[in-house]
Image: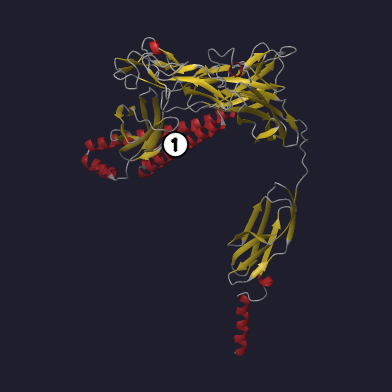
Amino acid sequence: MKFGIVLLWLVLLGSVGYGSKSDNIIVYVNSSKDVYVYGETVFLNASASSQQEIVNISIYVNNELANSSNGRYVNYSAVLSPGGYFYFANATDNVGWNGRSSDGTFNVVELPSTTPSDTTPPNVSISANKEKYSNNETVYLHVLANDSGSGIKVTQVFVNNELKCTNSSTYFVCKVGPYATVSNGTTISYSYFANATDNSGNSNTTYPKNFYVTGNSSCNDLGYPVSNGQCASNGTQSFICNCYSTGCALLKKCTDVCLCPSGFLCNSTNQVCYLPPGTLTCSDGTLYGQCSVTLPKYCANGILVDNCTECGCPTGYSCNATTNYCYAAYKPLCGNGLCEVGESATCCRDCGCSGGMLCNRTSDLCYTPPGPAVYIELSLTSPKKTTLSLSPGQIIRLVFELKDENKRLVNNATIIVYPTTEKYSSSFLGDGQYEVIYQARTNATTPFQSYTINIKAKRYIGSEEQFSQPISLSITLDRFLDIDFITPQQNQTLIESQPVEVKIKYPDGSPVLVGSFMMTVGNGTIPLSLSGETYRAFLNLTNESYGAKNITFIGRDNYNNTLNKILVIYYTYRVDYTIYFVALLAIAGGSSAAYFVYKWMKDLSKDYNALKKEKVYLETMNKRTHLEFFKRHIDENTFKKLVLEYQQKAADVDRIIAEMEKRHRWLKWL
């Protein structure tokens, strides 16, 4: 008896796994490779087996936990730095015993670079926004650096051999100064240049250029210069221009040379002009019948009125002789990329140069370089037309060809789109071909209008920039609005009438809050009313037949932008057992009831057949979409979108057909 108990105890002891850890848990781990190339993903897989349940298994790489799992299996993947690694796995069962695999090793090696070394120095140019400056005026130095090999590492700007700016961008503006001269009327020259270094250590330095700072020798009287020692007047006071070594200033002076304005007397003590007692003036002190200091105001019998014909306008404004109001005189802005009226001879940055001339960015004038004529000509190859109709935000691909004066293809240029606020990217395709990916504007606050963009090519000849004549593209945005279906949603199945809520929006997503919109269902039209930022109505399907329904949303906003969108729904019915009652009624009630049942079954079968035809149509359109994509008539994104749409609609139709056949089995006999 005792021997049996001891034997039973030994059997139970063995069944629960007591003993050495290695005898109870077997752990394996392996690597998919012994040697990985730097950049490749390292894969490790581990598994464990035991008479008991494995509750945890972990992988360690270089004695650090890499990954763990609450089960028998675990894997690890990562991109590791070059070097040697060892790994092992450890597992634990539900009674607390551990097991460890044997160690393994792998190496991550870095192959030597096969990229050819870059020995070509970068291109770099620098120019000031102008050549001559006045005292205490900031100087703007425009720097452009590019490198087709290893890329720009750093560009430095020096003024009089002193480092002023450091930047790694291909284009930046270095602001220096302001500078002051020793005395008024003298001019000091400053030398500046730029040095660019690429990532391969090649460097290039521009030829030194100069800008000049001249000391003031005059005062500023409301935008007009007044020479040293000369008089000025603001209508109520008299001044004299006095220049010192640090600058010039207008000082009050009403005796000797400078006299007070008409009607004023001079206080010789403080040199202030004043009006005699009882003199009639307007609210700002202007004498009756005189022009105010604030142009174009005129004192007319105690009232200040606009009279630019008599008093003139401030600097930068012009006079409307009919209304006597001043208006801002338009002055073309050189450097905005638009060749405007009056700029063709004064701004080569915007208008380019013809006849092989080059553009001097300092003076913005074209000049003829020594030697034979050199010029570049840009042409649009795709699309062929320069008038485009696009949807707001639409992306279009433009392809250009660039040639020189000998009709040879030019490969070292950059394509620029103006205004520079446009959204685009440009790239070189090879063999003189350049690509521009352009995104049309979006606008939700004003009517969608036509606009023009200018596209030019730019290259460097030495340190000088050369531009092609601009190509103008006229773009008209389609006047279409978009819609978000809140309830019901696209392809939703309805079993009864319900409210409709939609958000009508502009292409940029902002809501349309002013306009007239409606939806049509069958032959009926239902107006939409605005509630907050959404439009609402009630959809009544009581008189509609079962199956797919198109709800068309139409209308326009106050800018005449139009909406025309279709919502597809599927109208079905609730589960009820009225048919069984009607059938019994037909049996008991004779021909009248039988006719009623016949008519009901006929209408139901009509809806059923319509759904079957809809299914065939969707399957046909799905196949046709695949064919159009195979012929490359549509792109991949459009293909995926259409296929998904047809598949979803077909699934909804199948579901409705299955429901009808389940409730009315006799439909399968049709």
State left or right for residue 293 relative to residue 70.
left
Which quadrant holds residue 163? top right
State left or right for residue 645 relative to residue 552.
right
Residue 187: x and y in percent read 64, 22
Q: Is residue 144 visible?
A: yes
Residue 78: x and y in percent read 66, 51
Observer-nearest residue: 501 or 140?
140
| Residue found at x 59% / y 67% | 53
Residue 518: x and y in percent read 33, 28
- Amino acid carrying mark 1 in the image: Lys
Image position of 61 with respect to 613: above or below:
below
Quadrant including the C terminus: top left
Identify the colour scheme used.
secondary structure
Question: Residue furthest toward the front?
Answer: 269
| Residue found at x 60% / y 25% | 436
Residue 572: x and y in percent read 35, 39
| Residue found at x 59% / y 62% | 71
Quadrant including the N terminus: bottom right
Which quadrant holds residue 280? top left
SS of the residue under disc 1: helix
| Residue found at x 72% / y 30% | 122
Q: Is residue 521 visible?
A: no
How would you rate the neighbour count of disc 1 (Cα within 10 Å): few for under 14, some for 14-19, many for 20 or more?
A: many
Observer-nearest residue: 565 or 547?
565
The tally of labels here is 1
Tell me the residue that label 1 is attached to. Answer: 649
